[in-house]
Image (cartoon, rainbow, N blue to C red):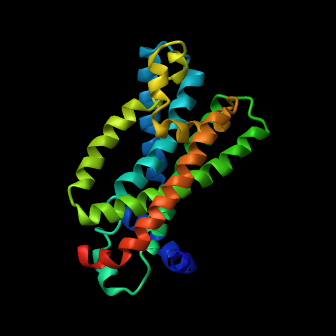
Amino acid sequence: MRQGWKQRPLWGYLGWQDIKQRYRRSVLGPLWISITMAVVATAMGILYGTLFDEPIETFLPYVATGLLIWYFINGCILEGSEVFIANEGLIRFLPAPLSLHVYRLVWRQSLFFAHNLVVWAVLVLIFPRPLGWSVLMAIPAFVLLVLNGAWIAMLTGIIATRFRDIPPIIASLSQLLFFMTPIVWSYERLRGNPLAAYVELNPVMHFVEIIRQPLIGDPIVWRHWAVVGGITVVGCLVALVALRNYRSRVAYWV
């Protein structure tokens, strides 16, 4: 992990080039990232706001911020399961640590997140919310999100390299996970409902809430931070053990 971190200029450049290549010869370039996010958030916010009878001035920022966080999480999960498979050529012929490819993936997703953050800023201007100093809590929350994205990519990448059925399984489960997570529906509506306890078992919900709450001006619920902290510690330990035991085999598996 340290060796990969020392090669920041390399994976930083590669991650930026990934985005440039995706929007090569496009007039708007990476701005399409924010435009796509804005269109999806607006359409889903208006649709589900109407279905659930939610006020648009509060529900639209709620949905947009949830989608902003979900795109990062989903990107780390889906691309993480194929992070070593997709870099087969580099792994075989470039003498570099495996963590370099994980850092590249997380850096690329962070750039996407930064682009999409523009949508949140615009909505804050259109629908003003009383944001205090608690909005700064989004910074350590995003750091935790990045750490978890890294260990998820490392762990699922190693497993999926050995068992190639894992990526399509993860892709199918991620679609289900999106609808099970309070992104386009409000968790507050389940207060007093027995289903609320089951929603708490969804770990993605806690990651979404620790960032969304400060960004939209909601009170900070420390229970979500405690759950995320526990998942971060356990996940990082498991990923490090897997990396120690199987990193020498990945080059043969790809």
Q: How many labels were placed on the picture?
A: 0
Q: Is residue 161 left or right of residue 52?
A: left
Residue 20 x, y percent position in the rendering? 43, 66
Nearer to me, 156 or 18 = 156
Which image quadrant: the C terminus? bottom left
Residue 211 x, y percent position in the rendering? 61, 41
Which residue is depicted at the point 53% across and 80% down? 3
Viewer can see residue 201 = yes
User: For residue 222, which quarter of the picture?
Assistant: top right
Q: Is residue 79 left or right of residue 2?
A: left
Which residue is depicted at the point 25% across and 78% down? 252
Residue lying at the far right of the rendered structure? 133
Residue 245 x, y percent position in the rendering? 39, 72
Which residue is depicted at the point 46% across and 42% down? 70
Viewer can see residue 25 = no
Which residue is depicted at the point 48% across and 74% down? 11
Using the image, determine if residue 184 lies above or below residue 83. Answer: above
Q: Is residue 53 left or right of residue 25?
A: right
Q: Is residue 177 left or right of residue 41?
A: left
Using the image, determine if residue 7 lies above or below residue 188. Answer: below
Residue 56 x, y percent position in the rendering? 54, 21
Nearer to me, 166 or 136 = 166
